[in-house]
Amino acid sequence: MSAYFRTSVLSLVIASFLMIASGCGKPTLTTLKGNVKLNGQPVPKCRVALFPDVSEFDPEKHGFGSGICDENGNYEIQHPQGGKGIFPGTYKVMFILWVDNKGKILPHDTKPSEVPGGVKNKFPEKYENLATTPERVTVPSGGTTKDFDISG
Protein backbone atom coordinates (compact mmCIF):
# COMPACT_ATOMS: atom_id res chain seq x y z
CA MET A 1 0.00 0.00 0.00
CA SER A 2 1.22 3.45 -0.78
CA ALA A 3 1.77 5.99 1.97
CA TYR A 4 -0.85 8.25 0.31
CA PHE A 5 -3.47 5.47 0.41
CA ARG A 6 -2.73 4.62 4.08
CA THR A 7 -2.90 8.31 5.04
CA SER A 8 -6.20 8.74 3.16
CA VAL A 9 -7.76 5.67 4.80
CA LEU A 10 -6.51 6.74 8.24
CA SER A 11 -7.92 10.25 7.69
CA LEU A 12 -11.29 8.78 6.68
CA VAL A 13 -11.39 6.53 9.75
CA ILE A 14 -10.50 9.42 12.07
CA ALA A 15 -13.09 11.71 10.47
CA SER A 16 -15.77 9.02 10.78
CA PHE A 17 -14.90 8.43 14.42
CA LEU A 18 -15.05 12.16 15.20
CA MET A 19 -18.46 12.51 13.50
CA ILE A 20 -19.87 9.59 15.49
CA ALA A 21 -18.30 10.77 18.75
CA SER A 22 -19.60 14.31 18.32
CA GLY A 23 -23.15 13.15 17.67
CA CYS A 24 -23.15 14.31 14.07
CA GLY A 25 -26.44 13.84 12.28
CA LYS A 26 -30.01 14.68 13.12
CA PRO A 27 -30.91 15.00 16.77
CA THR A 28 -33.52 12.68 18.19
CA LEU A 29 -37.13 13.73 18.52
CA THR A 30 -38.05 15.30 21.83
CA THR A 31 -41.38 15.86 23.56
CA LEU A 32 -43.49 18.99 23.24
CA LYS A 33 -46.88 18.96 24.88
CA GLY A 34 -49.16 21.37 26.65
CA ASN A 35 -52.59 22.96 26.68
CA VAL A 36 -54.37 25.41 24.37
CA LYS A 37 -56.99 27.87 25.56
CA LEU A 38 -58.88 30.55 23.68
CA ASN A 39 -60.09 33.37 25.92
CA GLY A 40 -59.39 31.20 28.96
CA GLN A 41 -61.35 28.17 27.72
CA PRO A 42 -59.79 24.86 26.57
CA VAL A 43 -60.04 24.32 22.80
CA PRO A 44 -60.88 20.72 21.87
CA LYS A 45 -59.94 19.49 18.37
CA CYS A 46 -57.66 22.47 17.66
CA ARG A 47 -54.66 21.77 15.42
CA VAL A 48 -51.37 23.09 16.82
CA ALA A 49 -48.84 23.32 13.98
CA LEU A 50 -45.13 24.07 14.34
CA PHE A 51 -42.87 25.34 11.59
CA PRO A 52 -39.19 26.20 11.95
CA ASP A 53 -38.48 29.84 12.73
CA VAL A 54 -36.68 31.00 9.58
CA SER A 55 -34.15 33.01 11.58
CA GLU A 56 -32.83 29.78 13.13
CA PHE A 57 -33.69 27.28 10.38
CA ASP A 58 -31.22 24.48 9.81
CA PRO A 59 -32.68 21.78 7.54
CA GLU A 60 -30.48 19.16 9.18
CA LYS A 61 -31.76 19.83 12.69
CA HIS A 62 -35.32 21.04 12.27
CA GLY A 63 -38.53 19.46 11.26
CA PHE A 64 -42.17 20.23 11.34
CA GLY A 65 -44.80 18.93 13.66
CA SER A 66 -48.41 19.15 14.67
CA GLY A 67 -50.86 17.84 17.20
CA ILE A 68 -54.60 17.79 17.74
CA CYS A 69 -56.01 18.90 21.08
CA ASP A 70 -58.08 16.42 23.07
CA GLU A 71 -61.39 17.35 24.72
CA ASN A 72 -59.52 19.27 27.46
CA GLY A 73 -57.31 21.27 25.08
CA ASN A 74 -54.21 19.12 25.69
CA TYR A 75 -51.88 18.46 22.75
CA GLU A 76 -48.72 16.49 22.02
CA ILE A 77 -46.68 17.28 18.92
CA GLN A 78 -45.90 14.54 16.43
CA HIS A 79 -43.40 14.50 13.59
CA PRO A 80 -45.05 14.27 10.12
CA GLN A 81 -43.43 10.87 9.58
CA GLY A 82 -45.30 9.50 12.58
CA GLY A 83 -42.93 9.65 15.54
CA LYS A 84 -43.98 11.44 18.72
CA GLY A 85 -42.07 14.64 19.26
CA ILE A 86 -40.13 17.18 17.26
CA PHE A 87 -36.48 18.08 16.75
CA PRO A 88 -35.06 20.60 19.23
CA GLY A 89 -35.15 24.18 17.97
CA THR A 90 -37.26 27.33 17.77
CA TYR A 91 -40.61 27.19 16.01
CA LYS A 92 -43.45 29.45 14.94
CA VAL A 93 -46.79 28.14 16.21
CA MET A 94 -50.10 28.26 14.35
CA PHE A 95 -53.56 27.39 15.68
CA ILE A 96 -56.38 26.20 13.44
CA LEU A 97 -59.91 25.12 14.24
CA TRP A 98 -62.18 25.38 11.22
CA VAL A 99 -65.90 25.95 11.80
CA ASP A 100 -68.68 26.35 9.26
CA ASN A 101 -70.94 29.42 9.06
CA LYS A 102 -73.13 27.89 11.81
CA GLY A 103 -70.17 27.41 14.18
CA LYS A 104 -69.97 23.61 13.74
CA ILE A 105 -66.42 22.26 14.11
CA LEU A 106 -65.24 20.69 10.85
CA PRO A 107 -63.00 17.62 10.44
CA HIS A 108 -59.27 18.37 10.00
CA ASP A 109 -59.20 17.02 6.46
CA THR A 110 -61.86 19.52 5.35
CA LYS A 111 -61.04 21.53 2.23
CA PRO A 112 -62.25 25.06 3.06
CA SER A 113 -63.05 25.85 -0.57
CA GLU A 114 -65.50 22.92 -0.69
CA VAL A 115 -67.64 24.00 2.30
CA PRO A 116 -70.87 25.79 1.30
CA GLY A 117 -70.87 29.20 2.95
CA GLY A 118 -67.14 28.97 3.66
CA VAL A 119 -65.20 28.31 6.85
CA LYS A 120 -63.80 30.41 9.63
CA ASN A 121 -60.96 29.76 12.04
CA LYS A 122 -62.08 30.12 15.66
CA PHE A 123 -58.70 31.72 16.35
CA PRO A 124 -57.89 35.27 15.24
CA GLU A 125 -56.58 35.35 11.66
CA LYS A 126 -53.01 36.20 12.64
CA TYR A 127 -52.62 32.75 14.28
CA GLU A 128 -53.19 30.81 11.05
CA ASN A 129 -50.48 32.58 9.06
CA LEU A 130 -46.73 31.95 9.48
CA ALA A 131 -45.94 35.55 8.61
CA THR A 132 -48.18 36.99 11.32
CA THR A 133 -48.37 34.50 14.19
CA PRO A 134 -46.81 36.03 17.30
CA GLU A 135 -46.42 32.66 19.02
CA ARG A 136 -43.03 30.95 19.24
CA VAL A 137 -41.73 28.01 21.20
CA THR A 138 -38.17 26.87 21.82
CA VAL A 139 -37.92 23.12 22.27
CA PRO A 140 -34.79 22.00 24.16
CA SER A 141 -33.23 18.57 23.66
CA GLY A 142 -34.84 17.36 26.89
CA GLY A 143 -38.37 18.27 25.79
CA THR A 144 -40.73 20.81 27.29
CA THR A 145 -44.31 21.69 28.13
CA LYS A 146 -45.81 24.83 26.61
CA ASP A 147 -49.30 26.13 27.37
CA PHE A 148 -50.97 28.75 25.21
CA ASP A 149 -53.84 31.08 26.17
CA ILE A 150 -54.86 33.03 23.09
CA SER A 151 -57.04 36.15 23.31
CA GLY A 152 -59.43 37.01 20.56
Image (cartoon, rainbow, N blue to C red):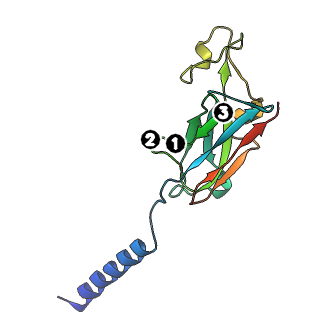
Q: Is residue 88 visible?
A: yes
10 Å crowding of disc 3: few (<14), some (14-19), many (20+): many
What amino acid does circle 1 point to? Gln
Give the mark toward the camera: 2 or 3.
3
Please state if 81 lies on the left or on the right of 11 as rendered: right
Quadrant where the C terminus sits is: top right
Q: Earlier in the sequence, mark 1 or mark 3?
A: 3
* Marks 2/3: CA–CA distance: 21 Å
Q: Choose between 48 and 33: the one closer to the eye.
A: 33
* Marks 1/2: CA–CA distance: 6 Å
Please name the residue that numbered disc 2 is placed on: 82
Q: Choose between 51 and 139: the one closer to the eye.
A: 139
Residue 40 to residue 17: above or below: above
10 Å crowding of disc 2: few (<14), some (14-19), many (20+): few
SS state under label 2 = loop
Quadrant where the N terminus sits is: bottom left
Q: Are marks 1 and 3 in contact (CB under 8 Å)?
A: no
SS state under label 3 = loop
Please name the residue that numbered disc 1 is placed on: 78
Q: Are marks 1 and 2 in contact (CB under 8 Å)?
A: yes
- Residue 33 in picture, x, y percent from top left: 61, 45
